[in-house]
Image: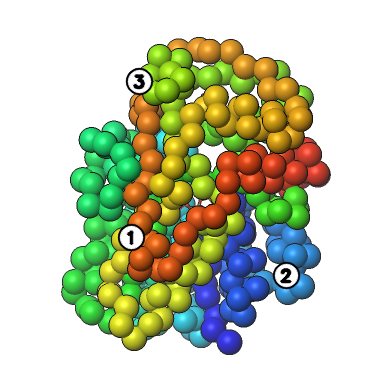
Amino acid sequence: MQKILITGGTGFIGSHTAVELIAAGYECLILDNFVNSHPAVVNRIAQITGKTPLVIEGDVCDAVGLDTLFATHTISAVIHFAGLKAVGESVREPLRYYANNVNGTMTLLLAMMKANVKTIVFSSSATVYGEPDSSPIPESAPYRAASPYGRSKAMVESMLTDLTLSDPAWRVALLRYFNPVGAHPSGTMGEDPTGTPNNLMPFVCQVASGRLPMLSIFGHDYATADGTGERDYIHVMDLSEGHLAALRYLARDDAAPLLIANLGTSRSHSVLDVVTTFSRVNDLPIPYQFVARRPGDVSAYWADASYAEHTLGWKATRSLEDMCRDSWNWQKQNPQGYRN
Ligand code: NAD
Ligand code: UFG
């Protein structure tokens, strides 16, 4: 059985991917410092899969800890989710973001190189495209990241690309996620942001549960069909399946050393689409008001996800209805997230 190291494996996307990998017959070793997650998620993974993954509390910036980990465990590949992801926070604390996201990845790669583990799937983001010229966005669109967070992702992408050029034994997948939402259909795992959510779907869920009084829709005057911002929302279960597909691709004899793939649905939905769909499928009112645009927001963008489909044989299948229903199912069963 192949053992996969999942850094950040107790976070939102990592925990769902761990479930997917265990179901596919992989053994998972999770490394997380719990800076943005809760240890209770491990019991939920065990509940769903019937297997408890081994979890090491540790930091990807800790070179000694990583050397010990690789010396103790035979790892086939790494999926590297560990990172900080709040755009606004990255503007206020850029060095913290570069230290954690860039230096953390470099420390991880040095440890992997020493241990001769040369296969890695990296969590990148559509944020590397910034404000694109047009949508759908192909992988060939230029880097235009507009925040330290986005630039940290672009820097890591460059670092990993250089590595594959220097040594063809590396197998690297750079997966650029669009807007991950939704939750495990059991309602036992989902997104659990600390404090007031920055992102749309968790905010809508907390309005639905009465934890927050009203949604503020940022901007009603964009050049979109209904004037609100449009995004490519992707169900976290589809995203998890994308990681499994990438891992399988990298294990193929004919795999290219470097794979760069958008993970999205190739469709966009407006903020009002999300609100009305959520209300309809869950039969709940979502009070909202229109307020000024959020600084730094792009009006509309969505993926061209055809490359992932051709190369990985992967395609997102879940609808916005599924995303809204599963997000609410998680929220209503766990009103305080994993702190219940
Ligand atoms: P998350 O915050 O839920 O998960 C990240 C996990 O990494 C957390 O469990 C956190 O505790 C851990 N972590 C952070 N720094 C660490 C460190 N130095 N050492 C060990 N563990 C550390 O976020 P997520 O939504 O699951 O995102 C996972 C990855 O995907 C991140 O790299 C993020 O930047 C990227 N991404 C997320 C989105 C999104 O909207 N959720 C979009 C594009 C890309
Ligand atoms: N929005 C609101 N009200 C809110 C929150 C969001 O109207 O309370 C709107 C935004 O203006 C935007 C849409 O909902 O039009 C989506 O906003 P999110 O904050 O959910 O997501 P973003 O597209 O801004 O950014 C997310 C992640 C980034 C990541 C990016 C990748 O937060 O980390 O997707 O596409 F880089």
Examine the rendered structure and indicate whether residue 126 appears above or below residue 208.
below
* Upstream in sequence: badge 3 or badge 1: 3
In the picture, the disc for residue 261 is: none
User: Horizontally, is 176 left or right of 132 in the view?
Assistant: right
Residue sitting at x 75%, y 55%: 186
Amino acid type, label 1: Tyr
User: Horizontally, is 10 left or right of 111 in the view?
Assistant: right
Provide the secondary structure element on which disc 2 rests: helix
Amino acid type, label 3: Ala
Residue 172: give x, y in percent of width and height. 33, 69
Residue sitting at x 58%, y 51%: 318
Residue sitting at x 54%, y 34%: 199
How packed is label 3: few (under 14 Cα within 10 Å), some, or many (20 or more)? few
Quarter holding the C terminus is: top right
In the picture, the disc for residue 49 is: 2
Say if residue 122 shows up in the picture: yes
Q: Which residue is mark 1?
A: 307
Q: Which residue is mark 3?
A: 223
Structural distance between the alpha carbons of marks 1 and 2: 31 Å
Residue 236: give x, y in percent of width and height. 57, 52
Examine the rendered structure and indicate whether residue 180 appears above or below residue 309.
above
Provide the secondary structure element on which disc 3 rests: loop
Amino acid type, label 2: Thr
User: Horizontally, is 174 left or right of 268 in the view?
Assistant: left
Residue 222: give x, y in percent of width and height. 38, 19
